[in-house]
Image (spheres, rainbow, N blue to C red):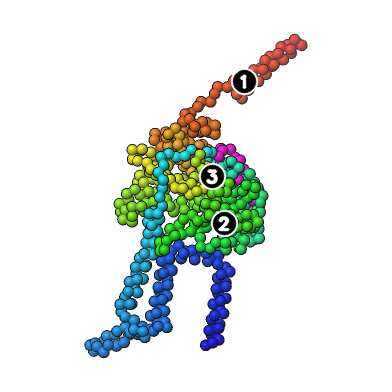
Amino acid sequence: MKKLSTKFIIWTIIVLLVVWFFRPFFHGLIMSFYISPLKGILILAILIGIYYFTGKFGKIKLTPTGMGIGDKQNYSINTANKVSAKIVASFFVFLFVVSIMLGLESEIRLLVTSKQVDYDQKTDLPNFEPIRLIPKPVAARFASDSFQNPQEHLGDSQIVMMDGKLQRVMPRLPDGTWLYFFNKLNGFVTVDVDTLDKKVSIEDKQFKYSEGIGIFDNLHYQLPLKKYFVQYSSEPIYLKNDKGEWVTVVPYMSYRGLIFRVPYWAGVMVVSADGTFTDYTPEQAQEISYFKNNRLYPKELVNYYTESYSYKGGLINLWFLHKNQIETVSLPGSEFVLHASTDEGFKQIVVAEPYGRSYGIYKIFIFDATTGKREIIEYSQDSQLTGPVAAADYIKREFPSYSWDSFSLSEPRPMKISGDLYWLMSIVPNDAAGIAKTVLFNAKTNKVVAFDDLATLDNFVKTGTLTTKPVTTTPTPADTNAEIKAKLETLQQDLNALKNLVK
């Protein structure tokens, strides 16, 4: 027995050491219990019940009562520690209640969140400065068409403000199984998205830890080693610090509450190229100069908070009445959270229409991507403003010559122009090879205005009026060709006259 006990202790220590060493691999599983304590309570209750009723404290036995008719015999429950029927019944009732609560847990968590998350009222959208013009698929196409490295591929892009420009940044990650284990992130490709022109930059910078590499140097393996009981954003952000050096920024969330836990922004982890990790609270991060008017707030939190808004009226309202209930909307292939640089800072914008078969604009949620401040614009029924989904249909009707099986509308961006709400959209071919046309849709009048150049678009955004191109005296190519043709004809006539004189 002593040898068995010693062996058990040794194996227990070995298992615990292995789990501790490889704890990043269990991070997702452990966090699921940390976020949802009911799962742990249910499993623990079942294990205790099994142990109590069938384990060391005595097995359940059926004892004949001596009563019955013929060969039939009645039995009573008996255990070594005399567990009463009331305890058994209470245990199964407890399991039933916990199971029901676990089944409704996600909705109850959203309900609790909706009661804790408030929004400041806002009447107008901030002005986009600069305007976000190139959709994500087009930016990815521009980057891949300019990239020439058979050992690398481009990762998912994130939009940030850098060097005074709105840019999409794509990490250069090793391509292929072998290189995944032995190569590093070696730099970035950036695409300017505040212009209609293709402007791509390729930069070299190797990172010790990053996404897209294996195994122990992977960013998502290293992060839990620094801070474990937090939920890291799945979208690392790449920026340049004050020294012009690239850094990786990973926002993270923590949870408050005992049973139904509510997420909140807890901080950001900054990873330098040499593998140095620096942890900042939200307040500390906001004091860092290269973070100001830039993206820090977790996009996952924006999605969760806006989803919880529909639960403000309670579960009965959510399931049956639908008062003040929303649906966040975008277009196919476009993200629900729009990141935009504005005159009020870097914002994360979510558009919502009413629940059900209504397509007017209902509410716009605005999150400050640097501070996390939450604001909401609520539109009354009298506003009669068309939402982005219906706006797409009107825009397609305006361009009947386009084959909409080969083209699509991308990234509806709400804009305030001369006091009116507009939807800025891009007509993009399915292969994302550039922008066919940039259009503005007036949500009040349903009128569509198309633009082929940035100057005309900028002027319309600032003034709300279209300007005609000024008349110029510079000759057109047709004028030049006609002039050359006339001179050639004159020269030919002179040449013929000279030939006649020679004769």
Residue position marked by numbered label 3 in the rendering: 293
Percent across and percent down for residue 329 are 42, 47
Name the residue located 57 percent from the left edge and 49 percent from the top edge. Answer: 288
* Mark 1: few/some/many CA within 10 Å (<14, 14-19, 20+): few
Would residue 424 appear left or right of 238 to someone viewing this image?
left
Residue under label 1:
482
Q: Residue furthest left?
A: 69
Q: Are marks 1 and 3 in contact (CB under 8 Å)?
A: no
Question: Looking at the image, is mark 1 or mark 2 earlier in the sequence?
Answer: 2
Q: Give 225 or 192, whichever is nearer the viewer.
A: 225
Distance of mark 2 from mark 3, alpha carbons? 19 Å
Q: Is residue 180 above or below residue 85?
A: above
**Pointer 2 residue:** 279
Q: Residue at x 41, y 40 (%)?
A: 123
Q: Which contiguous range is marked in magenta?
A: 187-200
At numbered mark 1, what does the secondary structure look like: helix, strand or loop? helix
> Element at badge 3?
loop
User: Contact, CB < 8 Å: mark 1 with mark 2?
Assistant: no
Q: Nearer the viewer, residue 404 or 158?
A: 158
Amino acid type, mark 2? Asp
